[in-house]
Image (spheres, rainbow, N blue to C red):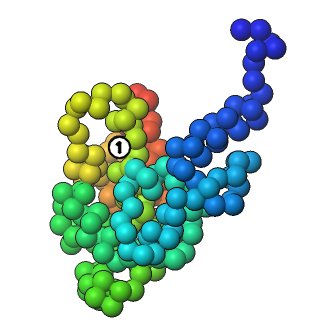
Amino acid sequence: MTVKDRQTPEAVAKKAAKRVAAQVKGLRGIKYAGVTVKSDGFARRSASGQFIQPRALYRANPLERIEMARQGLPAHYVQKTAKLLRTTQDRLNQTLHISRSTIDRKTREGEPLSQAQSERLMGVMMLIGQVEEIMSEAGDESVEFDAGAWVSEWIEEPLPALGNRTASELMDTAEGQQLVSRLLAQSVAGAYV
């Protein structure tokens, strides 16, 4: 490869952003990393109560996820996410630090979760989506793999990289979610966890 063939970091970033935009199918009229993306309506679908799959949420543009959190996810997403995790709603409520009565009331009255509650739930959903994306990139689609069940088990294991805490203990804060997501990515790359 000659110097002439090398791309600038900006060109590489722009190309990657276009690839992500194409995968996500974007956001209407919003620019992210210098690329205008068109919306497939994540926030609209969320507000209408239509469940958004974790992998789609993981791949979504961060600006769209911010808007979803601000609008508040429908409360019934907690129950649907618990089913994906193959766990009880009560266990997920403990991880999210949201009481069962709050979820039941908001579901019954059609109220969305608060921004903070939505962000915590989105963190768990995106972790499932991250695992689904990792498995997809691994390339063997013929292998039966339940990302939700795997995440449910993994977040309950004490991890040396977390001082023998479980990942579920950290999923109630944005910083904790980022740490857990990075840890998962590092473990896939073969780094010590």
Position of 9 relative to 33 (above/below): above
Residue 40, horizontal then vertical, whole percent: 52, 59
Q: Is residue 93 above or below residue 169?
A: below
Q: Is residue 115 left or right of residue 37?
A: left
Disc 1 residue crowd, few under 14, some 14–19, many 20+, Cα 10 Å: many
In the rendering, at what x and y percent does residue 127 appear? 39, 52
Left or right: residue 126 compared with residue 10: left
- Would you identify the image quadrant in which residue 63 lies? bottom right
> Could one spot residue 172 in this view of the protein?
no
> Residue placed at 68% from the left, 59% from the top?
30
Residue 151 point in image, percent of width and height: 28, 49
Which of 112 and 172 lies nearest the eye of the viewer? 112
Residue at the (43%, 53%) spot, across then down: 56
Quadrant in the picture for the C terminus: top left
| Residue 147 visible in the snapshot | yes
Residue 127, compared with residue 183, is above or below; it is below
Label 1 SS: helix
**Image point (75%, 32%), residue name:** 11
Q: Quadrant of the N terminus?
A: top right
Q: Is residue 190 left or right of residue 26?
A: left
- Extreme residue in the right direction: 4
Residue 147 spot, x, y in % from top left: 28, 46
- The quadrant where residue 140 appears: top left
| Residue pictured at 37% horizontal, 69% vertical | 50
Q: Amino acid at mark 1?
A: Glu
In this orientation, which residue lies closer to the viewer: 36 or 101?
36
Compared to residue 155, the image places residue 131 above or below, namely above
The single residue placed furthest to the top in the displayed view is: 1
Residue that carries the numbered disc 1 in the rendered image: 132
